[in-house]
Amino acid sequence: MTDFKAEATRRANTRTDLSPTERRVLAGEIETTLRAAADAAEKAKAAAAVEAETAAERARIATVIRAGSSNGRPRQAARLALSTPISAEGAAAVLMTLPTDAAASPEALVVPTAIGTFGTQAAVTERRRIASILGHAEAEGRFPVAAALAVETALDLGQALAALTSAPKSEARKYPTLAERSAAAGSFGPLAGGADHMTRSQRVDAIWSKAVNDANASIGAVPAAPEARPVPLNPSMTEDEATALRGAGGLAGGALADLAKG
């Protein structure tokens, strides 16, 4: 640790042309300058560390969204990235067990407002900024532009919205039936417990809840989910929906509530 007083005294004493009183005054001035310079250096170091943490989290989320974009699931990739510390490689594996964004229900595409609290405060703050842009009403129909503004720039919400609102909206999505969504999703693992008492929205929440748990478990963040049991059929379902639901189970077959609740 630097002894500012001693260093200031040493420097002042080199001034043989000054009286002892003048050297003491000079030493005080030098000490003040040295302390101010050291304080500025510490603040700059802390700011650089925060910026590095912010940039690293932004880059992680960007790579996860790109991984999702490559297989038609950028919105669901954004949800995973904002809710779990998953990498792009881990996200790619989880996302392939989910329907594409075009085949997913509206609830499955909602960007969480209650983002994950893992990592440093700088990382949490950055996720909150990104979520505020991706989850804003103006991002609807403009997700690619919103994503670019959120993860390729450091713009705050107001600045991002100014750019976002000038972009045209894409054509409205057509939401397919449960059977169509399940067919597009491939083979999901069954939901743990029973699903016959769940509404469709609750099933979506359950699917996201399991996917988030599986994503965290894959990196050791949470214990793996217990082995799932077959899903009892809901008597109110059509045969096509029942068949589709039987096929819906696996890494994300019941896993995404942290994201949907956001």
Image (cartoon, rainbow, N blue to C red):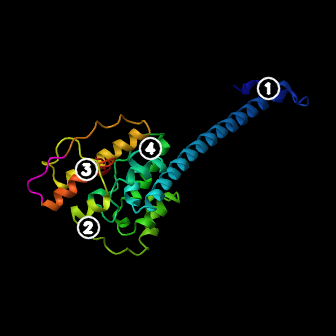
Tell me if mark 2 has few (under 14), some (14-19) or many (20+) residues whose alpha carbon lies within 10 angstroms of its own.
some
Where residue 123 sits: x, y (%)? Answer: 48, 45
Q: Is residue 66 visible?
A: yes
Query: Helix or strand or loop: what does disc 3 sit on?
Result: helix
- CB-based contact (under 8 Å), mark 2 and mark 3: no
Where residue 184 sits: x, y (%)? Answer: 31, 62
> Any magenta on residue 254?
no
> Any magenta on residue 235?
yes
Q: In front: 67, or 191?
A: 191
Locate the N terminus by quadrant.
top right
The CA distance from mark 2 to mark 3 is 17 Å
Q: Residue at x 45, y 47 (%)?
A: 90
Q: Residue at x 79, y 26 (%)?
A: 9
Q: Residue at x 41, y 36 (%)?
A: 221
Which of disc 4 and disc 2 is earlier in sequence?
Answer: 4
Where residue 166 sits: x, y (%)? Answer: 44, 74
Q: Which dot marks residue 57?
A: none
Q: Is residue 105 visible?
A: no
Which of disc 4 and disc 3 is earlier in sequence?
Answer: 4
Residue that mark 3 sits on: 205
Query: Helix or strand or loop: what does disc 4 sit on?
Result: loop
Residue that mark 1 sits on: 9
Which of disc 4 and disc 1 is earlier in sequence?
Answer: 1
Please provide the residue range marked out in magenta.
231-237
The amino acid type of the residue labelled 4 equals Pro
The CA distance from mark 3 to mark 4 is 19 Å
Which of disc 2 and disc 1 is earlier in sequence?
Answer: 1
The CA distance from mark 1 to mark 4 is 51 Å
Residue that mark 2 sits on: 175
Task: Mark 1 vs mark 4: give the one in front.
Answer: 4
Residue that mark 4 sits on: 85
The CA distance from mark 3 to mark 1 is 68 Å
